[in-house]
Image: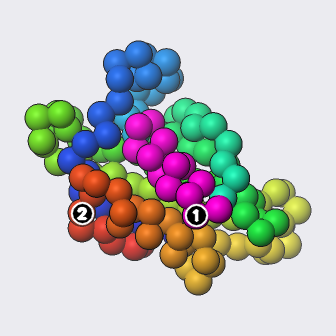
Amino acid sequence: MRFVFDCHGYTDARDDMDQTLTGVSGRSLMQAVRSGLKRQGYACGPVRDEDWGWFFRAERGGRRYLCGGSLEGEGNADAGDTQEASVFIQPERGLADRLRGLNRPDPDDPACADLRKVLAELPKIEAIVAL
C-alpha cells in the first residue's frame, strides 16, 4: 500500500543528496519512518538509495517487507515550504512468488496499518491519503 501526504520538513543533507545517482530526496523521511516501524516491533535494515528514492527492508512475524519513499518538489522544507511525499510498504516477493501469484500486496496486511500509524505520529506530516 502507498500513502501520499504533504510534508513540511525532512530536508536531506547536501552530502546525502550527492551520494545518490538521481538526487531524489527523502532519506531523512525514510530514516524517521524506519525508526517508527522499529518502535512498532519491526527489525529494519539500513536506509539505502534507489533510482526512484530511498528504501529499507523490514521484517516482523516472519514476514519480510520492502518500505520505500521519496519527496517531490523544489520547495525548501527548512523555510516551511510544502513538499509532496510518497511512502509505500509491500511484501518482498521473489520470482517464484510473482510467477505463482503468491504473497501479493494486500491493503488489509497489518503492516499497512502500522505504516499509517507511524506516518500519523511523525511531526510535519499532514493530509495522509492511502492509494
* Membership of 35 in magenta stretch: yes
Magenta-colored segment: predominant secondary structure: helix
Residue drawn 40% across and 44% down? 29
The residue identified by callout 2 is 126
x then y, percent, for residue 50: 56, 35
The residue identified by callout 1 is 40
Residue drawn 54% across and 49% down? 34
The image quadrant of residue 75 is top left
Numbered range of the magenta stretch: 27-41
Q: Amino acid at mark 1?
A: Gln
Q: Is residue 100 above or below residue 92?
A: below
Which residue reaches farthest right?
96
Q: How is the image coloured?
A: rainbow
Q: Secondary structure at mark 1?
A: loop
x then y, percent, for residue 27: 44, 36
Q: Is residue 18 above or below residue 85?
A: above
Mark 1 surroundings: few (<14), some (14-19) or many (≥20) residues within 10 A: some
- Residue nearest the viewer, comparing 1 with 61: 61
Q: Secondary structure at mark 2?
A: strand
- Mark number for residue 28? none
Image quadrant holding the C terminus, namely: bottom left
